[in-house]
Image (cartoon, rainbow, N blue to C red):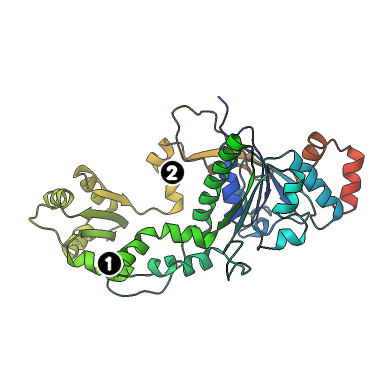
Amino acid sequence: MKLPLEDIRILDLTHVWFGPYCTMMLAHLGAEVIKIEPPWGEMTRYFPPLVENESPTFISMNLNKKDITLNLKHPKGKEIFKELVKLSDVVVENFTPGTMEKLGLGYEDVKKVKPDIIYASLSGFGQTGPYSRRPSYFSIAEAITGHAYMAGLEEDREGKPRGSPQAYGDLGPALFAALSIVAAIRYRDKTGKGQWIDVAQADCMVSLASQAIVTYTVSGLTPLEARRKRRSLGQVSVGGFFKAKDGYVAVLASRGAMMERLAKALGVEEVDKEMFERWVSERTVKEVVDTLVEADVAVAPVLNIDEVVEEPHLVARGLFTEVEHPKLGRIKVPTYPVKFSEIRGFKVVSAPTLGQHTEEVLSGLLGYSKEEIEALRREGVI
């Protein structure tokens, strides 16, 4: 069975987390993703901790891709890129707006080469608007859209703003970008027309703050005020992270049937948070989890990453696999997380080393000879 994007070729000009995670999702779905890096490599290759001079961060964002080096500031580099565009369906870039235009490789330039190209520009603040030329990273997007503030809220007072633990200001927008690229492919299937997709981190993070925004616009309550209001109404009687003898558990029991089941499991008439904290503190994580699972109350142990990769349910769901890295040997990586009833044949290939597929792409797709490729290497084009 073919994968859904098996007939799609994507030129990936992205770096760091936002763009690479987007294109990796498309690669998981079968697209041929050709990552194009400058001859010295994109910055994520040097993110610590390095193991045998390889970055785990780079590996985690670039599974299932091919990799070529190409200096887009060199005239011959631009020429090769345009040759590849003719044979491709999608271009994805996440430079600061205006960068690709300065190189002569913006959407309007590329559209002249391939009129039905789908060109996705991923940026912090979008291609238009007062902040469009500002640089951005995940923490900036989280800050300006309320997420950093909401993540810092404590139980009874405003807390210090916090960034997300895994750059969700990059990863969330990356999924919007991947979905939008698939939508543009379907649109092209129907109309024959390509288009320019403008994906901004800030825009996407506003969408992910939907509940807090609508709560405020309808009720006038900020997230902290809304939390206090819910607590005063008893809408969430027990919720949060609780310390057991040997670790922490997460529990969330709303009022109603689940609270009744929780009270029955604890052998009391009514449960309040203080009493529940004491009950948890006197037991191990396993004892708490087993008791609450039996009572059909939402609960989970709070795991560190070394425990996550061995967690029986996650392993049973097929969320991890081992791949052969060219330098590091067998390593465990996450798989594509969604299950389909009809689509089969998903596979995971390790992230490529710098320029690993340069000769394969230039000779196989563009017909360059070994001598021509060596000449390009001497000139600093690849």
The residue located at (45%, 32%) in the rendering is 340
The residue located at (59%, 45%) in the rendering is 24
In the displayed image of the protein, which residue is found farthest to the front?
Answer: 191
Report which quarter residue 217 is drawn in. Answer: bottom left
Rendering coords of residue 189 (x, y %): 60, 35
Report which quarter residue 4 is drawn in. Answer: top right
Rendering coords of residue 65 (x, y %): 65, 42
Residue 28 seen anywhere in this rendered image of the structure: no
Rendering coords of residue 270 (x, y %): 10, 58
Left or right: where does residue 276 sit relative to residue 222?
A: left
The three-letter code of the residue at mark 2 reads Glu
N-term mark: 2 or 1: 1
Q: Are marks 2 and 1 in contact (CB under 8 Å)?
A: no
In the displayed image of the protein, which residue is found farthest to the top?
Answer: 1
The residue located at (21%, 62%) in the rendering is 277
- Is residue 332 depicted above or below 165 in this figure? above
Residue 99 seen anywhere in this rendered image of the structure: yes
Q: Residues within 10 Å of mark 1 (few under 14, many from 20)?
A: few
Image quadrant containing the N terminus: top right
Q: Which residue is mark 1?
A: 219
Left or right: where does residue 10 sit relative to residue 265?
A: right
- Is residue 111 depicted above or below 153 in this figure? above
The three-letter code of the residue at mark 1 reads Ser
- In whole angstroms, how far apart are the C-alphas of marks 2 and 1? 44 Å
Describe the element under mark 2 as helix, strand or loop. Answer: loop
Rendering coords of residue 127 (x, y %): 61, 61
| Mark sitting on residue 310 | 2
The residue located at (62%, 41%) in the rendering is 350
Left or right: where does residue 378 sit relative to residue 162?
A: right
| Mark sitting on residue 19 | none
- Is residue 149 depicted above or below 267 in this figure? below
Describe the element under mark 1 as helix, strand or loop. Answer: helix
